[in-house]
Amino acid sequence: MDTKIIELYSEEEETVYRKKRIVWNVVSFLVLAAALTVCVFFCVSAYRAETFDTLPYVIFTSIAGWTVYLTIRIFVIADLKAAVKHIEAIRKGEAEIVTGRFSLTKERLYIKKGIAMTKVNVSGNDKVTSLQIFDKKKKLFDADKAVSVKVVFGFITAYEAEV
């Protein structure tokens, strides 16, 4: 039977994540700038109207702007930053080969200020009983066809599959 090595991490991937992070940073600041502009508009128009008529609009716009900004920062940019750090560590780490039979579990782990990962059980190996795979990579990993895997810091980075 022939085997084929399938790499889960490419060199361009780190650059893609960095660019996405820059784009989302720009988007978040644009949202904040737009909210500030609208708040200033309402404050300026307060001279022409009753001051308390525009106050609820200023408060609502400010709260909405900050909510969207912080949501993007916490849930999008922080995940992208963690992914970049993960990929950097994986690319610089020392790899080892693990053989056996592999099966993806439904058990997900999340490192605070880190990445989400899925646990992979290893059978037929005396040393290693479980590994992890980056959640965004688990669709690329075919556990049924995997003969051996390349591992860095306990994360699967590539695998050798029967073809």
Image (cartoon, grey):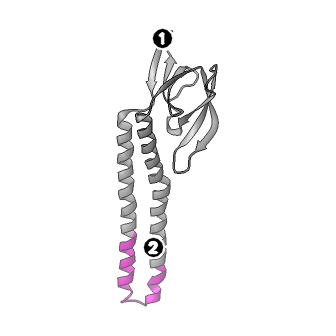
Task: Give how far across and how far down residue 131 sits, in percent.
Answer: 58, 31
Q: Residue at x 40, y 70 (%)?
A: 35
Task: Give how far across and how far down residue 137 sits, in percent.
Answer: 50, 35
Q: In the rendered picture of this protein, how many numbered marks are placed on residues?
A: 2
Determine the CA span between mark 2 and mark 1. 61 Å
- Of residues 9 and 124, the one nearer the viewer is 124
Question: Does 74 appear above or below 131?
Answer: below
- Report the amino acid beneath label 1: Asp
What residue did someone put label 1 on? 2
Question: Is residue 137 rendered magenta in the image?
Answer: no
What residue did someone put label 2 on? 62
SS class, disc 2: helix
- Of residues 110 and 21, the one nearer the viewer is 110
Decide if residue 52 is on the left or right side of residue 15: right
Q: Residue at x 46, y 41 (%)?
A: 86
Question: Is residue 40 rendered magenta in the image?
Answer: yes
In the rendered structure, which segment of residues is drawn in magenta?
35-57
Q: Residue furthest top?
A: 1
- Of residues 110 and 125, the one nearer the viewer is 125
- Magenta span main SS: helix
Q: How many other residues sit within 10 Å of disc 2, few (<14), some (14-19) or many (≥20)?
A: some
